[in-house]
Amino acid sequence: MAVHRLINVFPRERQHSIGSELKHSANGALAKIACSKLGLACDKILETLSNLEVARGLRLAKDINFQILSREYQKLSKETKEHSNVGGSTPYINSKKSSNLLPGEKDAPRQKLNHRQKKIVQHLKENRKIAFGQLNQIFSEVSPRTIRLDLKDLLVQKLIHKNGKSVGTHYTL
């Protein structure tokens, strides 16, 4: 998320070149971590760090922004390397938006829900069911992908149930 915000302050002509490379490597790193492909995640993290240094050298934003992001990606790289050497489970990342799982607790349920997930559960308590289109309207400030990830997390935790397929899909408690 922070990478995307940083790219938004780049001059327009640079957002499509170095900005898209930076987004691609950062998204790739997180996707590989989510899939427990930690060796590949390490490569993507290093690529992200390299892209950050290029953008920093071009002075596309304040230096402090690059310092902070580089420091965080270096921490992520260290944690990912440590966990890829210890059985390959998804690393525990110490941040407010991370899961509440410790290393080795791959299938344990998360204890905290984000504000959107709480709102989804509350809506279901009041209305019994909701469709994705309704959620897309309620949470218009976030991407549909974010909503899908929130739903997937609630499904994995067995807090909600998915009924139907494709357009007719709705969710219940």
Image (cartoon, rainbow, N blue to C red):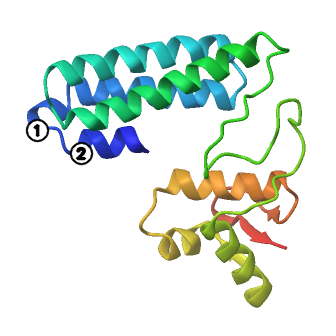
Q: CA distance from mark 2 to mark 1?
A: 8 Å
Is 163 placed left or right of 36 in the picture?
Answer: right
* Residue kind at label 1, given as amino acid type: Pro
Q: Which mark is residue 8?
A: 2
Is 28 placed left or right of 93 in the picture?
Answer: left
Q: Residue furthest bottom?
A: 126
- The quadrant in which residue 133 appears is bottom right
- Residue 51, horizontal then vertical, whole percent: 32, 18
Camera-side residue: 42 or 16? 42
Rendered position, 160 above or below 39: below
- Residue 86, horizontal then vertical, whole percent: 83, 14
- Residue 128, horizontal then vertical, whole percent: 79, 84
Camera-side residue: 127 or 164? 127
- Residue 103, horizontal then vertical, whole percent: 83, 31
* Residue kind at label 2, given as amino acid type: Asn
Is 18 placed left or right of 153 in the picture?
Answer: left
Q: Residues within 10 Å of mark 2 (few under 14, many from 20)?
A: some
Q: Are marks 2 and 1 in contact (CB under 8 Å)?
A: no
Regarding mark 1 in the picture, which secondary structure is present there? Answer: loop
Residue appearing at x 74%, y 53% in the figure: 153
Regarding mark 2 in the picture, which secondary structure is present there? Answer: helix
Residue that badge 1 annotates: 11
Rendered position, 131 above or below 23: below
Rendered position, 9 above or below 29: below
Residue appearing at x 60%, y 12% in the figure: 40
Is 127 placed left or right of 33 in the picture?
Answer: right
Query: Is the N terminus in the top left, top right, bottom left or bottom right quadrant?
Result: top left
